[in-house]
Amino acid sequence: MNFLQIHKFIIKLKKLFYILIFSTILGAPSTVVFAQKSYTVVLDAGHGGKDPGNLGNGFKEKDIALKVVQIVGKNLEKHSDINVIYTRNEDIFIDLWKRGDIANTAKADLFVSIHCDSHTSNAYGAGTFVLGLRGNKKNLEIAKRENAVILLEDNYREKYVGFDPNSAESVIGLSLLQEENLDKSLEIASIIQNNFTNDLKRLDRKVKQDNFQVLRETIMPSVLIELGFLTNRNEGAFLDSYSGQHQMGSSIAAAIESFIDHLKLNTVKASNGTRTISKEVKATIENNVGIEYKVQIASGKSLISTEAYNFKGLRDVQRIEVGRFYKYYYGISTKYRDVLESLKEAKQKGYTSAFIVAFKNGEKISVTEANKMD
């Protein structure tokens, strides 16, 4: 079996496992605890060693990426429930396939690859990418440039059979191995971009999808961050500075912390004791026979009345108790096009980090999977 076949087989096994676990929870007198002991985050500093990355205005991408990664890691390591792994913690060359292999072997919950961009114009701003089909021509060129490092690897022809990093057809043809985790990848990417834009006032180059090889090799939520453009003298100087690196690194770390908080609310573990799953959740699980979409607008430990005045005028907010936490949903619908309008409305009201979730028969599934069934 090749890597793609193995990956698809693993996904099928995981789905079967989740179905069995969920069925067990519903049929046995056990506590539903939404928690996990620890979360593993793999931080990947782009380029390194014989591969300097881009050298706009004399700045070195490989050095900036490494320093920012180390700042992110240092912040995350303050949390006892976060395990940080670095694909490189010094100036060495690491094959792209190996970076993904490190994350897969560690069974990471998140993979974050950090880079700096370049352009022939004076472009500037920060952007975050998740794995996806080809976007516009500009995104394709970024993907080709980042993937070109493959040519520096030993035996690259055997490792990446049929893949030419300089070929648009090869980039377009990259398989979407992360489809199951796309929703979570989009979630963390959105949080990162939100922090860059709102907290650091960086120009927002949006969350985009493209086929970076380093993301293609991972089988967990993964993002690639372009901190900014070294070819823009002002932005390059900012990213090469101690202050700039600490601002960007701290912002990324805060986004990861927020994402892990969300993961804690979505992790189900069975243990002996009394059932703590709420009646509302149970009713949804038992009675819903189709696809249901919702917009998650908030979550936390606070029990808030779902009256519109508590949610900036949004009506019919649904509150779900999940262990010791509460999730708040808006715009519940069986139609994806309708929930898109609800998401737009929620963001207009100020819930900028709101995102869509999907359920089938009460079981949470990826939005991508739900769209296929809708």
Image: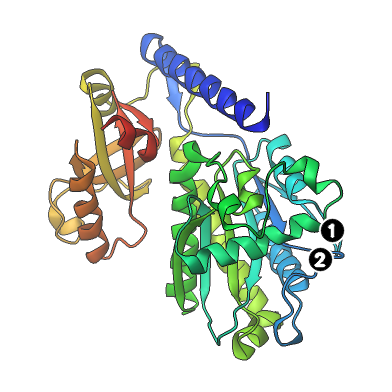
The residue pinned by badge 2 equals: 51
State the quadrant of the C terminus. top left
* Amino acid type of the residue tagged 1 in the rendering: Phe
- Residue 151, horizontal then vertical, whole percent: 78, 57
- Residue 227, horizontal then vertical, whole percent: 59, 71
Q: Is residue 344 above or below residue 360?
A: below
Going by the picture, which residue comes out furthest to the bottom?
Answer: 234
Q: Are marks 2 and 1 in contact (CB under 8 Å)?
A: yes
Q: Is residue 9 above or below residue 157?
A: above
Secondary structure at numbered mark 2: loop
Compared across the picture, whether 4 is left or right of 300 comes to right
Residue located 19% across and 54% down the image: 341
Observer able to see residue 108: yes
Compared across the picture, whether 58 is left or right of 226 comes to right
- Residue 98, horizontal then vertical, whole percent: 77, 45
Mark 2 or mark 1: name the one nearer the start of the chain.
2
Compared across the picture, whether 57 is left or right of 175 comes to right
- Residue 296, horizontal then vertical, whole percent: 31, 47
Residue 335 picture quarter: top left
* Amino acid type of the residue tagged 2 in the rendering: Asp
Residue neighbourhood size for the residue with mark 1, other residues' Cα within 10 Å, grouped as few (<14), some (14–19), many (≥20): some
Residue 288 picture quarter: top left
Going by the picture, which residue comes out furthest to the top?
Answer: 28
Label total for image: 2
The residue pinned by badge 1 equals: 93
Q: Is residue 80 above or below residue 54?
A: above
Q: Is residue 113 above or below residue 58?
A: above
In the picture, the disc for residue 275 is none
Observer able to see residue 305: no
**Label 2, label 1: how far apart the Cα atoms are:** 7 Å
User: Coloured how?
Assistant: rainbow
For the residue pair 325 and 355, the one nearer the viewer reads as 355
